[in-house]
């Protein structure tokens, strides 16, 4: 919930008898001065639930709302978060994970990257990936990965045979990303040393 003293009456909609701001206005405000992780995850979720052509419309509307704000605080942060958003993440933790790695200075990963067989069939979809260096980052949420350790280990082994390094993250890594970021930086150092 964000309280605003300054708004135009046209900025208020009624939804089930409750006055609310339109989605683009609420997202723009939250991106500027809300919790960064929550705001980014909310934007990603809003984009994810739209058809691809509608994503562009929401993206543009949020951008316009950010630019039109009278309160200029947080605008640069909001624009950075908006530029990073794709709507491809499958869950809010995946969005937060993407934000964490970018803020740590790593290249922007591709969300939901498809790994195909030699004949073009989809083999796996990686949560986050850097295909040029074959590094994958998978988020192991409790519900989605409960009882899947053997499958995940086999998948990681198959990906390793294809030349990929797979790094797994959990909710604990979102709270304290030190281990995860050290592992990612190490993987990038090994890969870039090999390419040099």
Image (tube, rainbow, N blue to C red):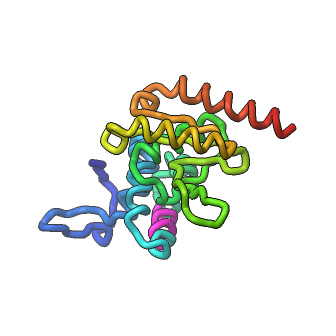
Q: Residue furthest left?
A: 17
Query: Is residue 131 shown left or right of residue 172?
Result: right
The image quadrant of residue 156 is top right
* Vertical relation: 193 (above or below) 20: above
The residue that appears at 58% across and 43% down in the rendered structure is 158
Q: Residue 69 location in percent, x, y?
A: 46, 58
Number of marks present in the image shown:
0
Does the magenta run of residues contain 59? Answer: yes
> Magenta residues, as a range?
57-65
Q: Residue furthest bottom?
A: 53
The residue that appears at 40% across and 69% down in the rendered structure is 50
Q: Nearer the viewer, residue 41 or 93?
A: 93
Can residue 173 be spotted in the picture?
yes
Q: Residue furthest right?
A: 196
* Vertical relation: 10 (above or below) 81: below
Q: Nearer the viewer, residue 100 or 66?
A: 100
The residue that appears at 54% across and 46% down in the rendered structure is 77
Secondary structure mostly seen in the magenta stretch: helix
* Vertical relation: 123 (above or below) 179: below
Q: On the rendered image, what quadrant is the C terminus found in?
A: top right
Q: Residue 53 location in percent, x, y?
A: 49, 76
Does the magenta run of residues contain 134? Answer: no
């Amino acid at each position: 919930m964000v309280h605003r003293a300054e708004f135009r009456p046209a900025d208020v909609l009624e939804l089930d008898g409750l006055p609310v701001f339109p989605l683009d206005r609420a997202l723009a405000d939250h991106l500027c001065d809300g919790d960064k992780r929550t705001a980014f995850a909310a934007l990603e979720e809003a984009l994810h639930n739209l058809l691809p052509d509608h994503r562009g419309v929401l993206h543009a509307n949020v951008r316009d709302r950010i630019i039109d704000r009278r309160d200029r605080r947080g605008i640069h942060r909001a624009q950075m978060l908006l530029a990073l958003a794709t709507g491809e993440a499958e869950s809010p933790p995946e969005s937060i994970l993407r934000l964490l790695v970018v803020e740590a200075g790593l290249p922007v990963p591709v969300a939901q990257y498809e790994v195909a067989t030699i004949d073009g069939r989809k083999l796996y979809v990686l949560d986050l990936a850097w295909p040029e260096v074959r590094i994958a980052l998978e988020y192991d949420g409790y519900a989605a990965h409960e009882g899947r350790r053997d499958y995940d280990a086999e998948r990681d082994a198959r990906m390793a045979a294809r030349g990929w390094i797979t790094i797994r993250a959990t909710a604990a890594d979102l709270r304290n990303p030190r281990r995860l970021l050290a592992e990612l930086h190490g993987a990038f150092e090994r890969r870039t040393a090999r390419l040099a």
